[in-house]
Amino acid sequence: MNIEIKKSKKPVEYAKAISFLENRIDKILKNKASELIWILEHPSIYTAGSSYNEREILDKSINLYKTNRGGKITYHGPGQIIFYFAINLNNRKKDIRNLINKIEKTIIETFKSYKINSFADKKNIGIWVIHKKKIKKIAAIGIRVRRWVAYHGFSINVNTDLKKYEKIIPCGINDKSLINLNTIKKQSYKNLKLKLIKNFIKNLKS
């Protein structure tokens, strides 16, 4: 199945990106567009998923964008890879959990190529690492499905300003903190985006 690969060099406003994705879903459902993988970065923004709680906002002065993805509150900004997709499950396996498994496998396999061990947690969606004997979150996953077309995706902190997360309870989890790839291991992550794309396409086929 043909998947368009889109990579934005400049940061893309969150609202514009979601509008683009929504339009793409409409076209996919009408068989007027191919599936999509879109790699980008957002300017600083806090977004709230469909299951967020007001108590998870610690600093009431923040601007919060309410979105239709699953999940709770998170932060997007410079130094973070956003991996969006629009995948038509009508032509694949109609199984949301199976898709999430493939996303988790994609991130874990990619990190392993950088000699970073990570894992998924059934209770707390996302990808986690153990750093200095503490469990830390390295990647967030949030998807939505419309008429069996799955979209939104996942984000990975490479060298994000983690102080931004102090204004919220990220993903509704207050007993575990977040971490950057650069903190785990200082090395070049230049090919990270390409490896994520390659592994995701491979796992979609499996």
Image (cartoon, grey):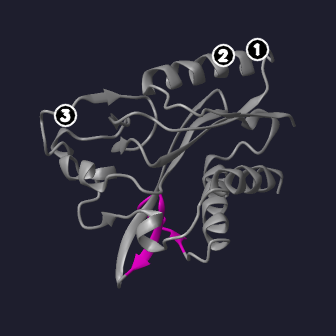
Whether residue 127 appears in magenta in the rendering, the answer is yes
Q: Which residue is mark 2?
A: 26
* Residue interval drawn in magenta: 118-131
Residue drawn at point x = 82 percent, y = 35 percent: 91
Which residue is most to the bottom? Answer: 133
Whether residue 194 appears in magenta in the rendering, the answer is no
N-terminal-most mark, 3 or 2: 2
At label 3, the amino acid type is Ile
> Marks 2 and 3: in contact by CB < 8 Å?
no
At label 2, the amino acid type is Asp
Q: Which residue is mark 1?
A: 30
SS at mark 2 in the image: helix
At label 1, the amino acid type is Lys
Quadrant holding the N terminus: top right
Residue 97 vs 65, above or below: the answer is below
Q: Residues within 10 Å of mark 1 (few under 14, many from 20)?
A: few
